[in-house]
Image (cartoon, rainbow, N blue to C red):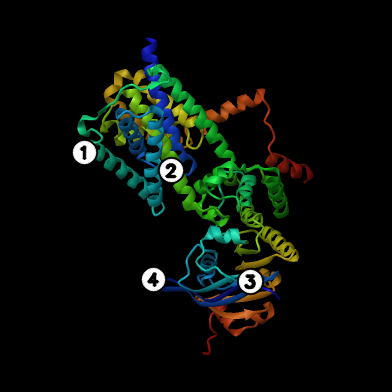
Amino acid sequence: MSSAYLYSILATATIFTLLALALNIITGYAGQAMMGIAAFFGIGAYTAAIITTNGGNFLLALLAGMLVSGIFGAVLGVISLRLQADFLAITTIGINFVMVALFNRLKITGGTLGLTIKKPVLFGVKMNNTYFFYMTVILIVVLCLLLGKMRRSWFGMALASINNDPGAARSFGINVSRYQILAFTIGTAVAGLAGGVYAHRMGFISSSDFAFVVSIQAVSMVVIGGLGTLRGPIFGALLITSLPEILRFADDYRELVYGLLLVLMVRFMPEGLIGDDSPVWSALMKLWRKFVPKKKTRADLIAESVEGGR
Amino acid sequence: MEELMRIEGLKMYFGGLKAIDGFDLVINKSETLGIIGPNGAGKTTLFNAICGVYTPTAGKVTFEGREVQGTPAHEMAKMGIARTFQISKPLSGLTIFDNVIAAAGVHEYTGIQSYFHKAHTPEIEDRAEAVIREVGLADVANKKASDVSLGYLRRLEIARALVTQPKLIMLDEPCAGLSNFAINEITELVMRLKEKGQSIVLIEHNLPITMKVCDRITVLSYGKKIAEGTPDEVKNNKQVIEAYLGEEDDG
């Protein structure tokens, strides 16, 4: 395997990791059904591509892609307030199809011919797959740090509460609507960022790059890895993007394999392969605890204080 | 006695169904007020209409002199009105401790700024721990809420309400479905809160408990108040006996 080929796969894998992490903010943390993330991936991709093909700065184009996608996401967030789980899922699927149709018809997105994008130059270097890979890894690391901070903050506590029980969340002061809209805005903005990187790494985009099947791929990544964790979507994205390389012989049946995997996971392992309560992760943690004893949490200490006394 | 909440002409209609039909009530500070009534009388609907889960069809709710009817539930919680749910609503994926921490953040959920404030601060943890010990949840503090029994979930409801440091706590059947032993424990807990001067509204099906705990009782039947007074007054009220036991047959 040549290193150019390897970096081409890695660049794709990391971009989809970013997309899976974006979806995880909406579906994993806030618990909102989102089956149309590819639409926002596309909005970010076209926005950034249109800016750079008109001579705009690459990094500013990525930011703009994020912003525009996030604005569309906020609008979807407002719509989502009136919809319960299944209807929200159907609505987001609909939005995906509408956006693909628009990408296909609008003049500014190149219609059916798509858009050809020049490889950007960053800090005087023409970007190739290797650079795209490193750049995306940096973006993933930064995003994971920000998400880690989010989970420890009141913002993260609000999303976790809404995910578990919106009625309970309201009863202790959480404005559920506001946090739902924020989750949609942030998640779709990150999806837009991933789209901008994708467009420039590919050098050519057309509407089929953002089809419904791409949304399902992203859902598969998150669900197979483990909803609501950081490692889950990363693992899932790397697994799913490397599968086509491993399953070369089954290329015609790829979508069938994703679909089957998704059904099997949801039925038999809803927590994902390495989600918090999954057998694999529990076994790994048990092994880990043999070497590194668990640091006692405040909750453990409270529980122990009465167990001894009773 | 100082007035805390006043409800005037409250109506809650669902299409043609008049679940609450012109209800008046005054709740005083440091008072324990019971709301009783047969099944389907509208007790929980009344809670939901007061706490902002529903927007009342008509009527006025005044809390500390401010008109608050129709204010959304999360704003009510911030104003100091905490409620528990008859059907427990645990945050199943979180530990009991984190459930209480989540509720302790009642004033922290300010939107995007809440990203910059860490949830598990020592002050918040101390407050959560104190409440957990008070209601008797300490032995399951590190268990996931999905793994504990109904008795603990009922206490969790009360713990989450208490940790918001409410001016008024509204308990919706905290003893429903519990064993006699667990009922006694909850009753003692409510008595302790009452001694501390907490203002309490209690919906309860179990009449002996309501009689024991409450200073005053309001009886609701088909969305209307049919009696109000001290436990003894209510116990001997003819209409109340009829509502509970059916009308006496003259035949």
Image height of B47 relative to A213, above or below:
below
Question: Which picture quadrant has residue B74?
Answer: bottom right
Q: Give the chain of mark 3.
A: B
Q: Amino acid at mark 1?
A: Arg
Counting the numbered discs, the total is 4
Q: In the image, is A104 to the left or to the right of A32? A: left
Cα separation between marks 4 and 3: 28 Å
Image height of A33 relative to A294, above or below:
below
Q: Are marks 2 and 1 in contact (CB under 8 Å)?
A: no
Q: In the image, is A215 to the left or to the right of B103? A: left
Residue B124 locus on image (x, y percent): 68, 47
Sort mark 2 into few (<14), some (14-19) or many (20+) by Cα contacts within 10 Å: many
Q: Give the chain of mark 2.
A: A
Mark 2 or 1 closer to N-term?
1
Report the residue marked by disc 3. B34
Sort mark 4 into few (<14), some (14-19) or many (20+) by Cα contacts within 10 Å: few
Report the residue marked by disc 1. A105
Q: Quadrant of the N terminus of chain A?
A: top left
Q: Amino acid at mark 2?
A: Thr
Residue placed farthest to the right in the image? A309
Q: Give the chain of mark 1.
A: A
Q: Amino acid at mark 4?
A: Gly
- The one nearer the camera, A67 or A10, is A67
Report the residue marked by disc 4. B15
Report the residue marked by disc 2. A185
Residue B124 got which mark?
Answer: none
**Please, what secondary structure does the residue beneath circle 2 have?**
helix
Cα separation between marks 3 and 1: 65 Å
Cα separation between marks 2 and 4: 36 Å
Q: In the image, is B126 to the left or to the right of A136? A: right
